[in-house]
């Protein structure tokens, strides 16, 4: 195996042009020039790199020295600032001690002022007077959160706002304010403010919204029968005007919207409640009809008592008298003993014919009076079942989910008692009226029988 040494490679490279027919001398000279040129370029490149490296090294040394100098300066500055901070802390402590010593009891006074400002801000924020004088709460909150001592002007302003709220609480005034009606439309109206209790516009009660500083018309207005506290305004005629006063500053009037009216109470009873009311209405109609009939019949019987000699077929007593008279006319002056018994039987039969007319409907009224509380009990059971179903589905976290079932249970029970109790009294009344008339018929029939026996004996 032949090894290619540099001399062999140079010999081959120098002899290669001979093989190609070129001149060897010119080729070697050109090759030498190229080698020299290449060496010169490499030397220049190395020199340039060395110069750049040396320049960068010097620059980095200079930057390092600059940074060390800055670090030293910052460390010295940090020490100076720490000394100054410690000095300021000590001076601040001494000044606070001096301020506390000089203020003495005034420090407690100013603390009381700030607390009073916060309390007054909370009171004014919910006050109806703020609708007439807006913007007072922000200043009071700023004073209550301030760290500096209040000056004399701020103390006077606090006193003025307190006095303004006190005086306004005892006045009845009118002013313009934004009122939102039940349809959501906002317009400016004249508002009547009664102290801190009520606000009205166009005869309707208003609820004050502190967030928007607007009044909202209550969806349900209180009736005069619902007013427990009345305020004499003296703004109308000589007798004055009456107004329902809410001592809780709108809370009770707001809860009034949530209070169901009688119709809504009945609706809470459900289908069972409607059945109870229908039965009560039916019983009432029967009672009114029977009382009317018994009143007319009683008047006719009283008139017949005054004219026993001329019986009328338009009343029960007249029909009984007619039966007795017909029996006597059929057998006049008969001395048969059985004739008296026949008269008694005919009179008893006539009375029996009249009894259904006088006692008609009494049993049905008594039945309705007994069924009504049973239906109320049924509604109670149905309502409790609905309540336990709500508890099973939603748990006991929200009492409102159980309110419907409980309302139905209580309302149906109340409706059953409300219907049953009056029906019992009315049944007793109807029964007593009919029994009074029946007693009159019995007395007169006995009198007729006795008269018939006397005639027979004679």
Image: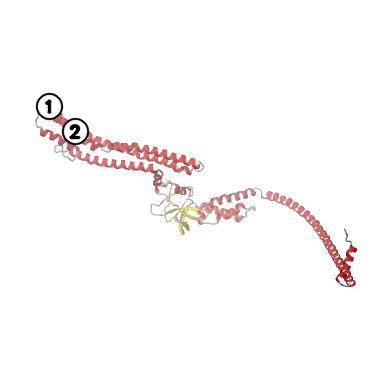
Q: Position of residue 74 (x, y in %)?
A: 78, 56
Residue drawn at x 20%, y 35% as measured from the top left: 353
Q: Quadrant of residue 413?
A: top left
Badge 2, how many Cα within 10 Å: few under 14, some, many 20+? few
Name the N-terminal-most of marks 2 and 1: 1
In the structure shown, which secondary structural element does the residue marked by tag 1 occupy?
A: helix
Q: Position of residue 244 (x, y in %)?
A: 43, 49
The circle drawn on residue 337 is 1
Q: Position of residue 229 (x, y in %)?
A: 43, 47
Q: Nearer the viewer, residue 91 or 253?
A: 253
Q: Quadrant of residue 290?
A: top left
Q: Nearer the viewer, residue 414 or 409?
A: 409
**How far apart are the two marked residues, 2 and 1, measured between alpha carbons?**
19 Å
The circle drawn on residue 349 is 2
Q: Quadrant of the C terminus?
A: top left
Q: Is residue 12 left or right of residue 375?
A: right
Residue 415 against residue 458 in the figure, above or below: below
Residue 184 against residue 320 in the figure, above or below: below
Residue 88 against residue 421 in the figure, above or below: below
């Amino acid at each position: 195996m032949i090894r290619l040494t540099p001399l062999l490679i140079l010999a081959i490279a120098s002899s290669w042009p001979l093989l190609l027919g070129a001149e060897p001398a010119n080729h070697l000279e050109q090759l030498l020039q190229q080698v020299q040129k290449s060496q010169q370029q490499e030397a220049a490149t190395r020199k340039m790199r060395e110069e750049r490296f040396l320049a960068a090294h010097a620059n980095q040394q200079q930057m390092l020295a600059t940074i060390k100098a800055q670090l030293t300066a910052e460390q010295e500055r940090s020490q100076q600032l720490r000394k100054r901070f410690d000095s300021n802390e000590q001076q601040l402590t001494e000044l606070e001690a001096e301020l506390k010593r000089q203020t003495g009891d005034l420090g407690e006074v100013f603390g009381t002022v700030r607390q009073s400002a916060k309390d007054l801000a909370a009171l004014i924020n919910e006050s109806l007077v703020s609708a007439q004088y807006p913007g007072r709460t922000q200043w009071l909150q700023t004073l209550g959160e301030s760290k500096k001592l209040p000056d004399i002007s701020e103390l006077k302003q606090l006193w003025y706002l307190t006095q303004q709220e006190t005086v306004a609480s005892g006045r009845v005034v009118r002013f313009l304010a934004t009122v939102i009606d039940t349809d959501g439309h906002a317009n400016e109206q004249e508002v009547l403010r009664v102290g801190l209790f009520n606000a009205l516009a166009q005869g309707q009660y208003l609820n004050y919204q502190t967030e928007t500083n607007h009044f909202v018309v209550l969806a349900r207005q209180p009736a005069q029968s619902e007013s427990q506290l009345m305020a004499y305004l003296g703004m109308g005629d000589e007798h004055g005007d009456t107004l329902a006063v809410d001592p809780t500053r709108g809370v009770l009037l707001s809860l009034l919207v949530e209070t169901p009216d009688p119709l809504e109470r009945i609706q809470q009873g459900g289908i069972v409640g409607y059945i109870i009311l229908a039965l009560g209405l039916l019983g009432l109609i029967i009672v009114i009809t029977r009382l009317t009939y018994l009143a007319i019949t009683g008047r006719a019987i009283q008139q017949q008592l005054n004219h026993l000699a001329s019986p009328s077929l338009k009343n029960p007593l007249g029909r009984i008298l007619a039966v007795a008279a017909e029996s006597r006319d059929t057998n006049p002056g008969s001395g048969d003993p059985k004739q008296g018994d026949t008269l008694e039987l005919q009179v008893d039969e006539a009375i029996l014919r009249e009894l259904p007319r006088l006692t008609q409907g009494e049993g049905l009224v008594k039945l309705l009076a007994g069924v009504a509380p049973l239906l109320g009990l049924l509604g109670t059971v149905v309502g409790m079942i609905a309540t336990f179903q709500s508890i099973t589905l939603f748990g006991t976290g929200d009492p409102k989910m159980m309110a419907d079932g409980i309302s139905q249970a209580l309302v149906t029970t109340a409706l059953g008692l409300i219907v049953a109790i009056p029906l019992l009294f009315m049944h007793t009344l109807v029964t007593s009226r009919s029994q009074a008339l029946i007693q009159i018929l019995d007395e007169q029939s006995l009198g007729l029988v006795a008269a018939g026996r006397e005639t027979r004996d004679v």
